[in-house]
Image (cartoon, rainbow, N blue to C red):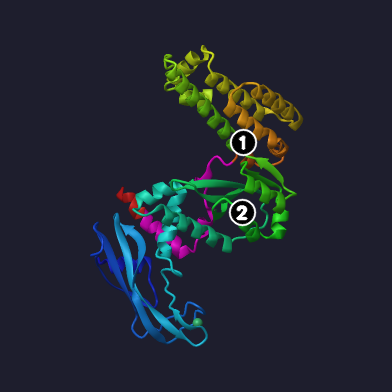
């Protein structure tokens, strides 16, 4: 069987044919090039208005990434025609395997987006020999496709989170719906500025924004500002996961400082290999870590005091009444401010500044889904549900090819 036969089976185009398939001369690794050409006498379609028109000229050959076959990269190769369109002027033609200037074929984008549900984005990029950016673009495409084809009515709770990507300080803003029956990634934007997040609210629209009941976020200022402005009626909850993460970071700082100090003073290095037993919850520790922790507890160390303060703070989340939780929080803050542990005091000041928003967690707890209570712990691997509703042809071909990929490995 020839590759063209398979390609015609998974993706048949009315106006284009697979001319031939050969090894690529451009790559150092094995790669396949699938040359396409228009069917005889077919006229190009204007990308502006979708009407067929007379051909104008041809652009240089372009390559489009297609789904890898048996681990071998596959490129579609085609020289785009330009159309002399009576209504739009000279435009580039529209082709069925791709839209706009994208160098990823639509099928490949759905394929990557499907895998990005199961793997981390980085993992998906590595598994299919592509870049993180391509996976990101694919997910973004899937999400915006989903948005354009999906109803945004009835969203009551959302969560906003930032993810760092690449090394350095590049961020994305992710917005999730976290209602009980429906958890999904709603929107992705570049950066984590107020401007970014405002774009989400513009997309959602005034009406729907005013119907939001709960919003969950971390303590990132621009987000807080935008939420206050665009959805003031919603109960704004600070995410439990992020608060505990801040405490964890503070303990880490105390421990690192103390370990350095002890080494400089020539003491025995009791803090060596102690990092995880100070950060983990007791129930998640290995036996070895439990022993290490009980050893540490016999010393009056700053790290241990920080650890005990954090463990004590866990009790905070067990309160039911916001009033009692508030009392606990205030007492805990006072105690920690007297601890002479600078990193812990820093977190405490932040907690005090956001007291009301933190207590909203208790106000929201009884009223809504576990979504907010659980927080945004799962982050990026949250399922972009829109993919489930992808056009059937894409979904099918992507899945067929992905099944081949799975059975190979
Ligand atoms: Zn046109």
**Picture residue at 70% right of the left edge, 35% below the top:** 355
**What crowding class fits label 2: few (fewer than 14 Cα within 10 Å), some (14-19), or many (20 or more)?**
many
Nearer the viewer's eye, disc 1 or disc 2? Answer: 2
**Picture residue at 43% right of the left edge, 83% below the top:** 83
Image quadrant occupied by the N terminus: bottom left
Q: Mark 2 near ligand 1 (CB under 8 Å)?
A: no
Say above or below: 124 vs 325: below
Say above or below: 198 vs 274: below
- What label sits on residue 169 in the rendered view? none
Dot 2 falls on a residue whose secondary structure is helix
Q: Nearer the viewer, residue 243 or 269?
A: 269
Q: Report if residue 193 lies within the magenta region.
A: no
Looking at this view, name the residue that lies furthest to the front: 264
Tell me if I can see residue 122 in this picture: yes
Segment colored magenta: 376-402
Residue 171 location (% of width, % of height): 51, 49
> Would you say 196 lies left or right of 363 here?
left
Say above or below: 365 vs 81: above
Residue 135 location (% of width, % of height): 43, 54
**Picture residue at 53% right of the left edge, 62% below the top:** 145
Q: Which residue is mark 2?
A: 197
Q: Report if residue 401 lies within the magenta region.
A: yes
Residue 112 location (% of width, % of height): 42, 55
Dot 1 falls on a residue whose secondary structure is helix
Residue 213 location (% of width, % of height): 71, 48
**Picture residue at 32% right of the left edge, 70% below the top:** 77
Q: Nearer the viewer, residue 17 or 235?
A: 235
The first of marks 1 and 2 along the sequence is 2
Residue 333, by quadrant, is: top right
Q: CA distance from mark 1 to mark 2?
A: 21 Å
Looking at this view, name the residue that lies furthest to the top: 298
Q: Which residue is mark 1?
A: 240
């Amino acid at each position: 069987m020839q590759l063209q036969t398979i390609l015609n089976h998974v993706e048949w185009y009315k106006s284009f044919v697979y001319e031939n398939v050969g090894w690529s001369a451009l790559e150092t690794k094995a790669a396949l090039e699938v040359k396409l050409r228009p069917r005889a006498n077919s006229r190009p379609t204007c990308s502006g208005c979708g009407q067929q028109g007379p051909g104008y000229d041809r652009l240089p050959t372009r390559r489009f990434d297609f789904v890898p076959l048996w681990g071998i990269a596959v490129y579609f190769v085609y020289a785009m025609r330009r159309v002399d369109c009576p209504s739009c002027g000279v435009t580039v033609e529209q082709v069925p395997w791709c839209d706009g200037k994208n160098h990823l074929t639509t099928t490949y984008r759905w394929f990557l987006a499907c895998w990005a549900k199961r793997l981390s984005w980085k993992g998906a990029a590595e598994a299919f020999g592509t870049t993180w950016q391509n996976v990101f673009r694919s997910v973004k495409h899937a999400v915006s496709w989903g948005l354009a084809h999906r109803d945004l009515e009835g969203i009551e709770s959302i969560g906003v989170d930032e993810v760092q990507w690449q090394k350095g300080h590049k961020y994305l803003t992710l917005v999730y719906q976290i209602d009980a029956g429906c958890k999904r990634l709603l929107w992705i934007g570049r950066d984590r500025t107020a401007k970014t997040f405002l774009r989400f609210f513009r997309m959602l629209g005034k009406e729907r924004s005013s119907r939001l009941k709960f919003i969950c976020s971390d303590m990132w200022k621009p987000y807080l500002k935008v939420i206050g402005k665009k959805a003031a009626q919603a109960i704004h909850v600070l995410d439990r996961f992020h608060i505990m993460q801040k405490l964890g970071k503070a303990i880490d700082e105390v421990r690192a400082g103390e370990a350095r100090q002890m080494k400089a003073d020539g003491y025995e290095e009791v803090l060596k290999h102690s990092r995880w037993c100070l950060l983990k919850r007791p129930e998640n520790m290995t036996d070895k870590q439990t022993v290490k922790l009980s050893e540490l507890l016999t010393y009056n160390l700053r790290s241990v005091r920080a650890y005990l303060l954090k463990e004590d703070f866990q009790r905070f989340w067990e309160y039911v009444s916001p009033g009692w939780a508030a009392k606990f929080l205030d007492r805990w803050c006072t105690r920690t401010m007297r601890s002479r542990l600078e990193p812990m005091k820093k977190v405490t000041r932040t907690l005090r500044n956001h007291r009301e928003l933190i207590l909203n967690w208790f106000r929201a707890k009884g009223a809504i889904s576990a979504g907010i209570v659980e927080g945004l712990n799962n982050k990026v691997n949250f399922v972009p549900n829109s993919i489930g509703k992808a056009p059937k042809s894409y979904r099918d071909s992507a899945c067929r090819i992905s099944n081949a990929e799975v059975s190979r490995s």
